[in-house]
Image (tube, rainbow, N blue to C red):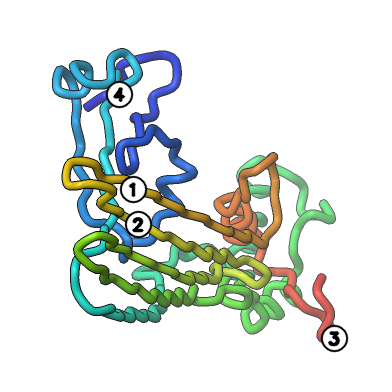
């Protein structure tokens, strides 16, 4: 549905019955989630009031169960490749387009902004695509180890995960390490106590063009609009 307020339009995040924020939600590992539910409109307002004006995302994490300890490991690795890369004018086409624009505006042929025939001929065989030169297919790696078990009185679920993803260019990466421990204890036949512990460590490496925003789209845009008349490297050194 559309945004229903001029103020904060984020939904309300509730994890294991506790109101959290998007930062905590983003830190969850898929392997520690039991279920996710979404409430909206009257169903959300009847429980959480005005805080649920933009809906509620309910997350229930996994719990322990009676039985011998069970270990489960999950590991994935993936490579992202673009389906299509937008193309731009090569060096020769760019130089020729500049000459055509100058002639269209009746600029005298003696104007130094014109490219000579020798220069045009050089650009026929010398053109540099900055994105092709600097692009790196992102690689994502994730590992997760879970332990669950317990007795009739005490049940536990332990989880740890590691995620690392590289960016489309050098010196861009993101790492996340998460840990969770959910422990349920039957204090009496009618009373149960639960202790939930979770921690997340994240590390982002990359340039920033505006506060906390990496501005990745600005980097891609800058390279896409970069003229192919200039090489990205000269004698092995960046321009």
Tell me the residue at 23%/79% (across/down).
68
Between disc 4 and disc 3, the foreground one is: 4
Residue 194 percent location from the top left of the image: 34, 48
Between disc 4 and disc 2, the foreground one is: 2
**Disc 2 designates what residue?**
183
Q: Is residue 133 left or right of residue 52?
A: right
Q: Is residue 59 left or right of residue 141?
A: left
The reply to whether dot 1 and dot 3 touch (C-beta < 8 Å) is no
- The earlier-in-sequence mark between 1 and 4 is 4
**Disc 4 designates what residue?**
54
On screen, residue 203 above or below 144:
above
SS type, badge 1:
strand
How dense is the environment of label 2, judged by Cα within 10 Å: few (below 14), some, or many (20 and up)?
Answer: many
Tell me the residue at 28%/15% (across/down).
49
Residue 11 percent location from the top left of the image: 34, 30
SS type, badge 4:
loop
């Amino acid at each position: 549905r559309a945004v229903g307020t001029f103020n904060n339009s984020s939904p309300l995040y509730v994890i294991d019955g506790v109101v959290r924020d998007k930062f905590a939600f983003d830190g969850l590992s898929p392997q520690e989630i039991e279920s996710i539910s979404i409430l909206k409109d009257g169903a959300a307002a009847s429980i959480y009031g005005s805080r649920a004006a933009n809906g509620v995302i309910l997350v229930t994490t996994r719990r322990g169960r009676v039985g011998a300890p069970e270990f489960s490991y999950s590991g994935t690795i993936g490579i992202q490749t673009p389906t299509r890369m937008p193309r731009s004018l090569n060096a020769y086409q760019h130089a020729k387009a500049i000459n055509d624009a100058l002639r269209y505006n009746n600029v005298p042929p003696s104007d130094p902004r014109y490219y000579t025939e020798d220069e045009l001929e050089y650009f026929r065989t010398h053109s540099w695509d900055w994105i092709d030169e600097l692009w790196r297919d992102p690689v994502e790696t994730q590992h997760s180890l879970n332990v669950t078990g317990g007795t009739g009185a005490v049940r536990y679920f332990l989880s740890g995960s590691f995620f690392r993803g590289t960016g489309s260019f050098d010196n861009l990466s993101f790492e996340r390490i998460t840990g969770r421990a959910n422990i349920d204890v039957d204090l009496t036949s009618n009373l149960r106590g639960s202790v939930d512990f979770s921690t997340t460590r994240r590390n982002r490496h990359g340039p920033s063009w505006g506060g906390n925003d990496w501005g990745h789209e600005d980097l891609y845009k800058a390279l896409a609009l970069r003229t192919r008349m200039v090489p990205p490297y000269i004698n092995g050194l960046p321009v």
